[in-house]
Image: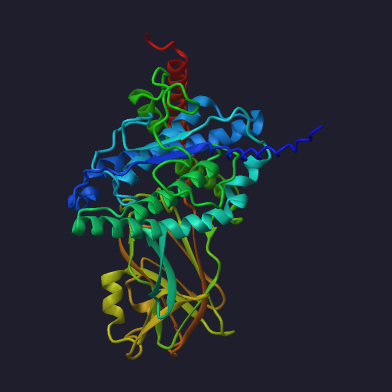
C-alpha cells in the first residue's frame, strides 16, 4: 500500500472588514481649470447662504432625533434623510472649494444623492441605535476625534494680543493647506499631484465620518485609520444599482424644495423665539423676586472716591415722561439714588442737574468724573481746580437734591434730557469717599415680559408647525409609490 500525504489546503483569506456606514466619494476632475479656484469662494457664496439656514435646521433636527433615539432607539427616517442631505450638500460645496478643489462642476442645490456628481456621501440608515450611547457619544466619546478634526480643519496661530502671546484658531487647517498646495501645483504644472489629492480626500473622509457619528447618524465609532483615495477601500468603480449600498434611482426622496424650505424657515423661527421666551421668563422672575421692600430694582453699593470737591457721573441721556407729566417713565419709572459718606460724621450732598448747568457750575472746580469700571470700583478721572464758587445748596441748578449726615436718598421721575448726577462735600473740604447705589421701579418690566412671552410663544408655534408640516410632507412623499 502506498500512503499519500495530504497537502494542507491553503488558508482562506480573511474576510474584508465591513464597510463604514458613512461612505464618502470624491473623484478628481480630469479637466480641472488652472485658475478657476481663485474665484470659487465667491461663486460658492449662494451655497454658503443656503447652508447657513440648513445648518440651523440640522441642529433642530439633531435635537429632535436625540429625543427620538432616547425614547424609541430609532432615528426617524425622514429626519435622517434630511440630516444626511445637509452633510452631503456641505461635502459637495467643500469638495468644490477649499476642502479639495477637486472639481469645476458647480455643486447642485439639492439634498439628494447624485451619482453623476464627482463628490457624494451615503450613510446607511441604522435599524436600531443605542439609547445609552446617544447620551455620551456626541461629546464624551467623540472628544479624541474632535482633537483630530480640529487639527484637520482649524489652524492654530500663536499671536501677540493684549500684551502677551495667546493661541488663536482660524479656518483652513491641514486639509485646507494641503488642498491649496495641490491646486497651486496644478496651476503651475497643469497636474494635481494624485497622491496629495488622495491624502486630502482621506482626511475629508475622516472628518465626515466623525460628523456622522457626532450627529447621531450611526453608532459605529470612526476608526483611527486614514482611508486615502477618492473612494472607499475596495471600491474601484461606482456601484451598480443592484449592488448593496448603491443609490436606488427609483427610490423617492421626500426632501424636495418645499419641505426643505419649510423646515429651514421653521427652524429659524424656533431659534428666533428662544431670546424672546428667555427674556420674558427672566423678566417675570426678576419682577417677582429681584425688587427690594420698596419696589425698587437696586444695584449693589459701590464705593466712589475722588481727591477733589465733587464727583460727577457721565452724561445721562434719558427719555422719560414728558415735562409736566406725573406719570413715571415707562422704562425706568421712579429713580432712586442713595449716597452715604464713608467718613463718620461728615455730611454729603447729592443732586441731579441738567448737564450744561452742571458744567457751568463745576467749571474750574477740582472734580472727578466716573469713568469705566476698574475692578470692584469705578475709575474716576480727576480734573484739577479749586473749590466751588458757591455752596451746592445755593447753586440753584438742581432738579432734585438731598444733603446732610448719614445716608442721603433722592427720588426722581426722569424727564427727557441730558442730566448729570453730582456728589459734593457741603462742608467745603476736599476729598470724596462715599458708598452709593441706584435703583429704579421699572413699571414696564412685567408688561414687557408678558409681551415677549406671547410673541416668543407665537413664533415658536409657527416654527414648530412649519417643522411638523415639513417632516410630515417629506415622510408622505417618501412612502408614496415611485412613478413607473
In the image, residue 418 sits, relative to residue 108, either above or below, namely below
Q: How many marks?
A: 0
- Answer with the quarter of the image where residue 217 lies: top right
> Viewed as shown, does residue 6 lie left or right of 357?
right
Name the residue nearer the viewer: 258 or 407. 258
Q: Looking at the image, which residue sits at the far right?
A: 1
Q: Quadrant of the N terminus?
A: top right
Residue drawn at x 26%, y 55% as measured from the top left: 183
- Answer with the quarter of the image where residue 236 lies: top left
> Viewed as shown, does residue 376 lie left or right of 198?
right
> Viewed as shown, does residue 428 lie left or right of 185?
right
Residue drawn at x 38%, y 29% as measured from the top left: 113
Residue 273 visible = no
In the image, residue 12 sits, relative to residue 354, either above or below, namely above
**Place of residue 286 in the rendered image (x, y in percent of width and height, measured from the top left):** 56, 50
**Place of residue 450 in the rendered image (x, y in percent of width and height, measured from the top left):** 49, 38
Name the residue nearer the viewer: 13 or 361. 13
Q: Quadrant of the C terminus?
A: top left
Residue 3 visible = yes
> Viewed as shown, does residue 442 lie left or right of 74?
left
In the image, residue 301 sits, relative to residue 8, either above or below, namely below
Name the residue nearer the viewer: 32 or 457. 32
**Place of residue 463 in the rendered image (x, y in percent of width and height, measured from the top left):** 43, 30
The colour scheme used to paint the residues is rainbow
Q: Looking at the image, which residue sits at the far top?
A: 484
- Answer with the quarter of the image where residue 262 lies: top left
**Place of residue 335 in the rendered image (x, y in percent of width and height, measured from the top left):** 45, 59
Name the residue nearer the viewer: 341 or 152. 152
Amino acid at each position: 500500500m502506498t500512503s499519500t500525504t495530504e497537502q494542507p489546503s491553503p488558508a482562506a483569506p480573511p474576510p474584508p472588514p465591513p464597510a463604514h456606514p458613512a461612505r464618502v466619494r470624491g473623484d478628481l476632475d480630469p479637466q480641472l481649470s488652472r485658475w478657476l479656484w481663485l474665484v470659487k469662494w465667491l461663486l460658492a457664496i449662494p451655497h454658503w447662504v443656503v447652508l447657513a439656514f440648513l445648518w440651523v435646521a440640522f441642529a433642530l433636527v439633531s435635537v429632535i432625533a436625540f429625543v427620538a433615539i432616547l425614547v424609541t432607539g430609532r432615528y426617524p427616517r425622514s429626519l435622517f434623510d434630511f440630516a444626511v442631505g445637509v452633510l452631503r450638500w456641505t461635502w459637495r460645496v467643500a469638495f468644490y472649494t477649499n476642502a479639495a478643489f477637486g472639481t469645476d462642476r458647480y455643486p447642485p442645490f439639492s439634498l439628494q444623492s447624485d451619482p453623476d456628481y464627482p463628490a457624494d456621501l451615503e450613510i446607511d440608515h441604522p435599524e436600531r441605535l443605542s439609547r445609552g450611547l446617544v447620551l455620551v457619544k456626541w461629546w464624551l466619546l467623540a472628544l479624541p476625534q474632535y482633537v483630530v478634526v480640529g487639527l484637520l480643519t482649524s489652524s492654530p496661530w500663536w499671536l501677540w494680543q493684549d500684551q502677551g502671546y495667546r493661541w488663536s484658531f482660524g479656518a483652513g487647517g491641514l486639509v485646507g493647506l494641503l488642498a491649496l498646495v495641490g491646486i497651486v501645483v496644478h496651476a503651475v504644472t497643469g497636474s494635481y499631484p494624485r497622491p496629495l489629492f488622495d491624502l486630502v480626500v482621506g482626511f475629508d473622509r475622516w472628518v465626515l465620518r466623525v460628523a456622522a457619528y457626532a450627529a447621531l447618524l450611526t453608532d459605529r465609532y470612526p476608526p483611527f485609520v486614514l482611508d486615502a483615495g477618492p473612494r472607499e477601500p475596495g471600491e474601484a468603480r461606482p456601484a451598480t444599482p443592484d449592488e448593496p449600498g448603491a443609490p436606488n434611482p427609483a427610490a423617492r426622496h421626500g426632501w424636495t424644495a418645499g419641505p426643505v424650505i419649510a423646515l429651514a424657515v421653521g427652524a429659524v423661527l424656533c431659534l428666533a423665539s428662544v431670546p424672546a421666551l428667555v427674556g420674558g421668563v427672566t423678566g417675570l422672575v426678576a419682577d417677582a423676586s429681584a425688587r427690594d421692600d420698596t419696589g425698587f430694582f437696586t444695584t449693589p453699593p459701590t464705593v466712589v472716591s475722588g481727591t477733589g470737591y465733587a464727583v460727577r457721573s457721565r452724561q445721562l441721556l434719558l427719555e422719560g415722561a414728558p415735562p409736566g407729566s406725573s406719570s413715571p417713565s415707562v422704562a425706568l419709572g421712579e429713580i432712586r439714588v442713595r449716597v452715604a459718606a464713608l467718613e463718620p460724621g461728615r455730611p454729603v450732598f447729592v443732586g441731579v442737574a441738567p448737564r450744561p448747568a452742571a458744567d457751568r457750575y463745576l467749571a474750574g472746580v477740582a472734580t472727578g468724573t466716573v469713568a469705566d469700571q476698574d475692578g470692584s470700583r469705578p475709575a474716576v478721572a480727576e480734573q484739577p481746580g479749586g473749590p466751588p464758587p458757591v455752596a451746592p445748596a445755593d447753586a440753584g441748578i438742581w432738579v432734585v437734591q438731598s444733603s446732610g449726615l448719614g445716608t442721603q436718598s433722592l427720588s426722581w421721575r426722569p424727564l427727557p434730557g441730558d442730566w448729570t448726577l453730582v456728589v459734593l462735600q457741603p462742608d467745603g473740604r476736599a476729598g470724596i469717599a462715599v458708598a452709593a447705589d441706584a435703583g429704579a421701579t421699572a413699571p414696564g418690566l412685567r408688561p414687557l415680559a408678558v409681551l415677549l412671552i406671547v410673541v416668543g410663544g407665537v413664533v415658536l408655534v409657527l416654527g414648530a408647525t412649519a417643522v411638523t408640516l415639513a417632516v410630515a410632507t417629506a415622510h408622505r412623499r417618501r412612502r408614496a409609490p415611485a412613478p413607473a
